[in-house]
């Protein structure tokens, strides 16, 4: 998340009523009803590979397993391309999809770097994260009206 | 009469479990983190609770088609499961169905609509902290209170705080001589979804732990949107800590506090002891 400009609401904002609504930036992808509905097949498929035998079959032949799981061509294609950002925008939940990534030998940090549009090395260079200067709701002025 | 000994807030990140199972406790990158659990383990050994009420969130492992806002384990046992990368070598967690049902009866009577779960599967939300804080065979019974932190709409921090207040009254009303410790697990800041992946905010995490200790109800006024902006989309699970703190009284003593954020998650650990138990 990019660092916002200095807050204009740094003080005098002690009660809930005085806080204006927030604008969530595109970096916040909320897993809500529409995503849960659209992503249902994908998530169900991902959760099914918690079973060791399913995991083995999926890794042995992804296409056959995904077809048997009832995924659409569009959904199969997203998995084929390992396009994690498209997957979570569509409705795949990362708690489910990480099971797929790990079965394929792809670490969470690599999945994440790809969603950020960074090389793995570039992402790792950003760790550990230092001070952000954003310590409370008083510091969220940049995302309010 | 049942007695609440205190509460512990702790991260439940799978990375901690992977490191533990790989025996990395003394590796330079992990040593400080695992050592930080020693004072918490020691406090638990000294206090010797009978039952842990563990406030956590499931991660689509028990609840996916059906997603309850608040669920409580009420069966004999909470089974450890394979989350998709192999089952961890730990025994199932014994539940405390008598206290669990007492809590459910009390909460429903006081307008909390609870989902009861006879076989609440133990995913990393429960097992990471249990395996960090106790040695198997588990010396405690474990009641899982699962708050939905995955599929929006999510319960507000205020709702979770109030749930905690009511769980306290339920436990205080329990006539068995049971010693109870509360765990709140999850967080702190982390984001695993989307282009904001890797969002970590040590400033907020440290402030959160301070507020949780000394001014906890101010956190109930936060919105889930504010928490997502401060701590990342998946950090909404800090409501588990807020609920835990709601179960404790005003009179707590800090036993231990630790924080580190080496990679993807703010690892927080906070041990608060109840000072309100009269003749202890």
Image (cartoon, coloured by chain):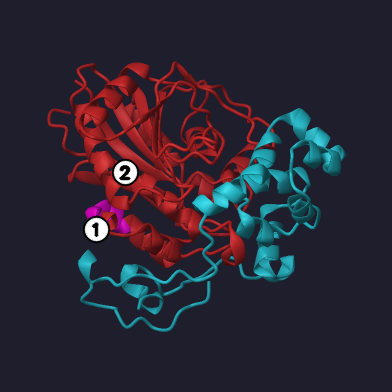
Chain colours: A cyan, B red
Query: Element under label 2?
Result: helix
Magenta-colored span: B210-218
At 23% from the left and 73% from the top, the residue drawn is A13
Mark number displayed over residue B278: none
Q: Which residue is mark 2?
A: B243
Residues behind callouts 1 and 2 on a single chain: yes
Q: Is residue A144 left or right of residue A97?
A: left
Q: Is residue A86 visible?
A: yes
Image quadrant where one finds the C terminus of chain A: bottom left
In the image, residue A87 above or below residue A126: above
Secondary structure that dominates the magenta span: helix
Q: Quadrant of residue A144?
A: bottom left
Q: Label 1 marks which chain's residue? A: B
At 19% from the left and 28% from the top, the residue drawn is B172
Residue in front for this viewpoint, B271 or A3: A3
Q: Label 2 marks which chain's residue? A: B
Q: Is residue B6 left or right of residue A22?
A: left
Q: Is residue B67 magenta?
A: no
- The picture places residue B224, in percent across and down from the top left corner, at 38, 57
Q: Is residue B215 magenta?
A: yes
Query: Element under label 1?
Result: helix
Q: Quadrant of residue B230?
A: bottom left
């Amino acid at each position: 998340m990019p660092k916002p400009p200095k807050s204009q609401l740094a003080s005098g904002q002690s009660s809930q009523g005085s806080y204006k609504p927030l604008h969530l930036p595109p970096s916040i992808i909320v897993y809500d009803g529409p995503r849960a509905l659209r992503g249902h097949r994908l998530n169900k498929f991902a959760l099914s590979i918690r079973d060791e035998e399913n995991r083995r079959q999926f890794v042995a032949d992804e296409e056959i397993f995904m077809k048997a799981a009832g995924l659409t061509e569009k959904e199969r294609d997203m998995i084929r391309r390992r396009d994690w950002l498209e997957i979570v925008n569509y409705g795949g939940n990362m708690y489910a999809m990480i099971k797929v990534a790990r079965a394929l030998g792809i670490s969470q940090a690599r999945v994440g770097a790809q969603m950020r549009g960074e090389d793995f090395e570039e992402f790792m260079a950003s760790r550990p994260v230092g001070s952000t200067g954003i310590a409370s709701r008083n510091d969220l002025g940049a995302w309010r009206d | 009469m049942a007695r609440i000994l205190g509460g512990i807030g702790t991260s439940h990140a799978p990375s901690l479990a992977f490191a533990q199972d790989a025996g990395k406790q003394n590796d330079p990158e992990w040593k400080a983190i695992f050592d930080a659990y020693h004072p918490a383990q020691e406090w638990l050994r000294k206090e010797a609770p009978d039952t842990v009420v563990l406030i956590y969130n499931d991660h689509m492992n028990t609840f996916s088609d059906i997603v309850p806002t608040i669920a409580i384990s009420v069966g004999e046992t909470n089974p450890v499961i394979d989350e998709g990368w192999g089952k961890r070598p730990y025994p199932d967690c014994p539940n405390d169905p008598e206290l669990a049902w007492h809590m459910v009866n009390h909460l429903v009577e006081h307008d909390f609509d609870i989902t009861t779960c006879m076989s609440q599967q133990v995913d990393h939300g429960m097992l990471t902290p249990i395996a960090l804080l106790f040695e198997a065979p588990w010396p405690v019974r474990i009641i899982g209170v699962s708050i939905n932190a995955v599929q929006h709409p999510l319960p507000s921090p205020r709702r979770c705080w109030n749930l905690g207040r009511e769980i306290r009254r339920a436990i205080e009303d329990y006539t068995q001589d049971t010693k109870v410790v509360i765990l709140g697990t999850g967080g702190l800041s982390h984001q695993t979804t989307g282009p904001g992946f890797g969002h970590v905010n040590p400033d907020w995490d440290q402030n959160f732990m301070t507020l949780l200790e000394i001014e906890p109800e101010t956190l109930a006024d936060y919105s889930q949107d504010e928490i997502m902006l401060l701590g990342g989309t998946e950090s909404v699970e800090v409501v588990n800590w807020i609920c835990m703190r709601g179960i404790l009284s005003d009179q707590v003593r800090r036993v231990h506090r630790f924080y580190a954020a080496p990679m993807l998650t703010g690892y927080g650990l906070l041990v608060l002891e109840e000072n309100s138990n009269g003749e202890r």
